[in-house]
């Protein structure tokens, strides 16, 4: 499991203050088409950890920061803790932005802020913005578990809000196959050899 690096995560500002700074210059959404922010997920077995990536798609060099809430089905997955009320998440080291996370107490909801007050330049190309580690419940019988984004706010370099749309993702869970289990009371049998009579 990967831990949060001080270089890629900051807890310097309270979330409410950070969000106010992100949108300090109020502006009406432009007529630009909605910018998709999506979820890309690896799969795993019950009891394993997977990486949930938040990706920018079609940003067109306009996006300087974002906020989103990430939610999940707690019956099959849970976000890994980064200590206290933070999650085990890390920002893309090639993007000079700060990542702040806060797990909402007693709920399956994580708020993430990804922006920088010192570097307001827009993200130049589509990329993975940040990654969070999730744990698959070892007792789950599910074969997939949804990860959703909500309350998405995307900002340009002047603090103006951009039109954006959130695309969910799914953790695919590989369950042990009952067909591979050994017969009760004995070891698994090897398949019988195939014998071909000479022509």
Image (cartoon, rainbow, N blue to C red):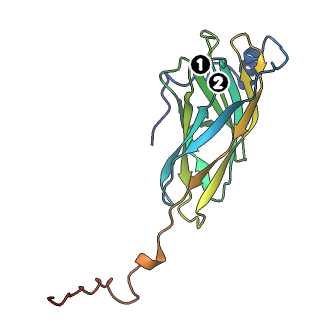
Q: Which mark is residue 115?
A: none
Decide if residue 57 is on the left or right side of residue 43.
right
Pointer 1 residue: 123
Q: In x, y percent, where is residue 129? A: 57, 29
Q: Identify whether 73 is placed above or below 28.
A: below
Who's the residue at 64% across and 38% down the image?
38
Proximity of marks 2 and 1: CB atoms separated by less than 8 Å:
yes
Q: Looking at the image, which is closer to me, 4 or 49?
A: 49
Q: Identify whether 72 is placed above or below 18.
A: below
Residue 189: image quadrant is bottom left
Q: How far apart are the alpha carbons under marks 2 and 1?
A: 8 Å
Q: Looking at the image, which is closer to me, 26 or 9?
A: 26
Q: Which mark is residue 59?
A: 2
Looking at the image, the residue that sits furthest to the right is 28
Decide if residue 162 is on the left or right side of residue 127.
right
Q: In x, y percent, where is residue 177? A: 47, 73
Who's the residue at 54% across and 59% down the image?
173
Q: In x, y percent, where is residue 12? A: 62, 19
Image depth: mark 2 or mark 1 in front: 2
Who's the residue at 62% across and 17% down the image?
61
Decide if residue 114 is on the left or right side of residue 92.
right
Q: Looking at the image, which is closer to me, 159 or 29?
A: 29
Q: Residues within 10 Å of mark 1 (few under 14, many from 20)?
A: many
Q: Is residue 84 visible?
A: no
Quadrant (top left/top right/bottom left/bottom right) for the C terminus:
bottom left
Looking at the image, the residue that sits furthest to the front is 199
Q: Residues within 10 Å of mark 2 (few under 14, many from 20)?
A: many
């Amino acid at each position: 499991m990967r831990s949060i690096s001080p270089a890629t995560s900051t807890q310097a500002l309270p979330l409410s203050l950070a969000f106010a700074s992100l949108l300090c210059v109020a502006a009406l959404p432009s007529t630009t088409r909605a910018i998709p922010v999506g979820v890309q997920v690896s799969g795993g077995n019950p009891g394993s950890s997977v990486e949930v990536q938040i990706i920018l798609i079609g940003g067109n060099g306009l996006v300087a920061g974002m906020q989103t809430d990430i939610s999940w089905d707690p019956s099959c997955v849970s976000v890994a803790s980064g200590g206290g009320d933070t999650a085990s998440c890390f920002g893309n080291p090639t993007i000079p932005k700060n990542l702040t996370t806060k797990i909402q107490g007693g709920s399956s909801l994580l708020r993430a802020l990804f922006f920088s007050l010192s570097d307001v330049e827009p993200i130049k190309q589509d990329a993975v913005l940040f990654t969070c580690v999730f744990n698959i419940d070892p007792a789950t019988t599910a074969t997939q578990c949804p990860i959703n984004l909500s309350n998405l706010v995307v900002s340009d370099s002047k603090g103006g809000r951009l039109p954006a749309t959130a695309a969910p993702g799914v953790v695919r869970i590989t369950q042990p196959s009952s067909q591979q289990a050994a017969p009760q009371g004995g070891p698994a049998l090897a398949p019988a050899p195939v014998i071909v009579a000479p022509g």
